[in-house]
Each structure stands twice: as structure tokens, then as C-alpha cells.
Amino acid sequence: MSWKEIYQSKLVTAQEAIRAIHDNDKVVTGFACGEPFGIERALIDNYKNYRNVEIINMLTLGGSPWCKPEMKGHFKLNCLFASQSNRKEISDGTCEFTTSHFYEIPDVIKNYICPRVSIVMVSPPDEHGYVSFGTTVDYTRGTTDYCEVVIAQVNKYMPRTFGNSIKHVRDFTYFVEIDEPLPEVKSVDITDTEMEIGRYCAQLIKDGDCLQLGIGSIPNAVCEQLWDKKDLGLHSELVGDGVVDLLEAGIINNKKKQTNNGRTVLGAALGSEKLNKYIDNNPSVELHPIDYVNNPIEIAKNDNMVSINSCLQVDLLGQVVSDTVGLNQFSAVGGQVDFVRGATMSNGGRSIIAMPSTAKKGLISRIVPLITEGSAVTTPRNDVNYVVTEYGIAQLKGRTLKERAKSLISIAHPKFRPHLVLEYRKRFNEDPFTNEERKEYFGEVKQQLNDVKEHIKDDVLSMLPIEKNSKGEQNG
């Protein structure tokens, strides 16, 4: 039987395909730009036909309909990465959450969660009968090797990618053809603060380094600062649009990599049509399962590996909190520790934790004496090397506790430094700064206060009524 005949024999509607899902099943689905929304909608529309079905997913760029009240007893979401649509439900117990380092997730799904059904999204088959997992290979492709039932949404908008990203049509149970544009993660405007953080991160990047960047404004800000670099490499679990221009210009050319030389290696692509077009049928970009891409041992095989990750909070000892706010789950560990350790093990490697100095519009400091009660430490202090804010770079590896705290205070927002100094004195029974250093940071505090006063003054003036004199001129 030809591959075309095999494909046609497995081609069904979404309604027909979901009949293979039974009560009490565990169903793992693709995530992010590869989430099979077309088939998921069919499940949601027929939720009353199912009892106690567990949906296993990572980051969703859509909603989390599995968490709606009417789904109770029918569907339950087991989330591997909290997102805006399910954080509240994780906190109130409506949604389950499983924590794991990203590179271990394929093993956790296969050997601990043990799903019977896998639902994925793929490209249409090529002339040899192979479909591609496109933007999201990560844990997704691996589930199709061992799940009893494998259902694929075939979508013409899914790019075809190289690497360990293909599978023959014979290896699927059903195909459902639903063409719809992929969800996008579009770039947003980069703030001055983020651009300054990017500038400091770029100071730690040298010609020939191999980068892990991630997605979001700070990685994009870093990319904006790399145009004077040469022969950079890219080995990253996720990337967004920010890398495309650097790849097209040859700034990132992967010439110096020890493994996958000449090729960009990714686990998933989370961008817009700009990124999808770049990776489509591009032999210089390879997508591989995340237990390869994020394995610290594999990461370390590339010399001069530089990882850049963000976080929510850092305490004065260097403990990093990236995925929780108190007892509430905000995101997930993801690949932060994978790449921090891989970069540390790399010959000449460096790991960077980058963040704005404040949160909640400047109301709270991200550098704190003690992490918020209930928060989980994402990256232990012993693993942390560089911490970057818009106020500079703190290098922690090999430093004493006092030196760590002093370095972190120096890159905190100036208005929070006096409080951090007081906490330092309580802990270490000494002043962290000389008289000259104190003058410097108190000078920054005064300038910050003056800036705030001027801002308030301008705001107040702008709200006052403007009167005009007899000549039609405005009176101040």
C-alpha cells in the first residue's frame, strides 16, 4: 500500500477521531504554536460524552476551557506550565500542576504520567509520506512513539522543519485536516529599561559564543544589542522573532559550535509568521526533542555557552525565584536550570539571570532580603553566576555571602537600596559600603526622588484648567 493510500485510510473528521478517547484516559496534547486547537474544540463540544479524562499540556497560547465549571467530572487539566488562562485555577485547585525541569518532561510524561492518547499538530505529508512537527518538537514528537492512540491535526500553516522533526504517516492512528493560522507570539515594544538590561547582557557576550535566549522583551532587547558581534551560535529551547534578523544577517551563523556545527538547534519556535517563514524548509534550522536540546550534558558540549533567563525575584544570597509568587504558580521552571547548569559546565560558558529591578510599576523591588514566603526556589544560589538589571551586572559565582549581597544591592533600584543596606547590617553586623560608596547610591536615590517629584508636578499641571486672556492666549 502506498503512503497516500495509508494516509487516506486514516483520514477522518474530528468527531470520528475523538471516539478513540475513552473515559478515564490520559491525553497529552501539543503546546504553544503547535497546540491542536481544532481537535480540542471537538472534545470541548462533546464534553458530556466523557468522564474523568485528564488533559496533559504545557504552555497554552489559547484559553483553558478544560477548567470551566461545567467540565468538572468530564475533563481535568494537568498543566506543566502555568499561563494566564489557568493560574487562578491552579491556585484554587481546579487545575492540576506538575513541576519538572524541561529536559526531564519527556521522561515524566512517558514513565510517570503514562498517557494512552497523544494529540498533535503536523504539516501535510511530503512526497515521501512524512509529516513534520514544525514549530514544536519538544516533548510532543516523543509521545507519538509510545501512545496507543495518536491523532494528528494536519494544518497547511504548520511549517516544515528539519532535525528530528518528521514522522511517517504509517505511525499515526488518525489524521484530521483542519487548516487554521497558528497562534502567534508577537514582539512588543521594548522599554528603555529592557533595552538597558539588553545592553548589559550584551557586554557579557563575546564573538563566537553560543547563545540560549528564550522569548520575550528582554531576549529581544539582547538581540538588538548584538549587531557588533561575530560568528554567534544558537542552541535554545525556545526562540521568538528577535533572532530572525540576526540569523539572516549572518551575525548568528553557528560556525564556532562544537555540535550541530552550522545549524541552529531549537526545541520549539514561539514567534509570529516572521519566524515561521524563516524556519520553514530551512536546512540550517533543526528542531529536536527537548530531552536532547535541554540536556545539560548536550548543552555543555558547545564551548562558550551563554544562557540568558529571566526571573521574578532574587534574594541577597542569590537564590532565584522564577515560577512562583508566594504559594501561587506563575509559570514553571522550564529550561532555566537546564541551561544554567549546561552553560556552567561548558568550557568558557556563562549563565545570566536578567530582570528589571522592580515590579508592579516600580512599587516593589525584585531584589529582596528574603524571598516571599511560600515561593519555590527555581535556581539555587550555588548555580547562579551573573545577575543583570538595568543598573548593572552582579557577578556571584565564587563570591562570599557578603560579596554577593553587596553586589546585588548595587544593581537594585536606588530607592530600595537603603532598606537592603539595613537588612545587610542586620545579617552581617557591618556596613556594606564605604562613605564614598554611600554618597554615590544616596545621590542616585535623591535624583530618583527629584525625577518622581517633577513627574508628579507635570501630571498635576496637565490636569489644571487652562484659561485664555482677551487676546486668546493661554494663561498658565
Image (tube, rainbow, N blue to C red):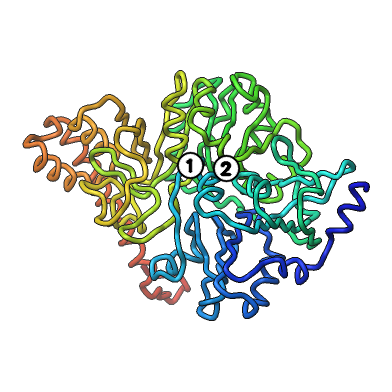
Tag 2: amino acid: Leu
Q: Position of residue 16 (x, y in %)?
A: 78, 70
Disc with the residue nearer the chain's start (1 vs 2): 2
On the image, numbered disc 1 is attached to which residue?
335
> Badge 1 local density, few (<14 within 10 Å), some, or many (20+)?
many
Is residue 238 toward the left or the right of residue 134 in the image?
A: left
Residue 26 got which mark? none
Tag 1: amino acid: Gly
Q: Residue at left 43%, top 52%?
A: 99
On the image, numbered disc 2 is attached to which residue?
238
Q: Residue at left 59%, top 65%?
A: 25
Q: Residue at left 69%, top 37%?
A: 164
Is residue 332 toward the left or the right of residue 441 in the image?
A: right
Give the secondary structure at mark 2: strand
For the residue pair 411 and 458, the one nearer the viewer reads as 411
Q: Position of residue 269 (x, y in %)?
A: 63, 45
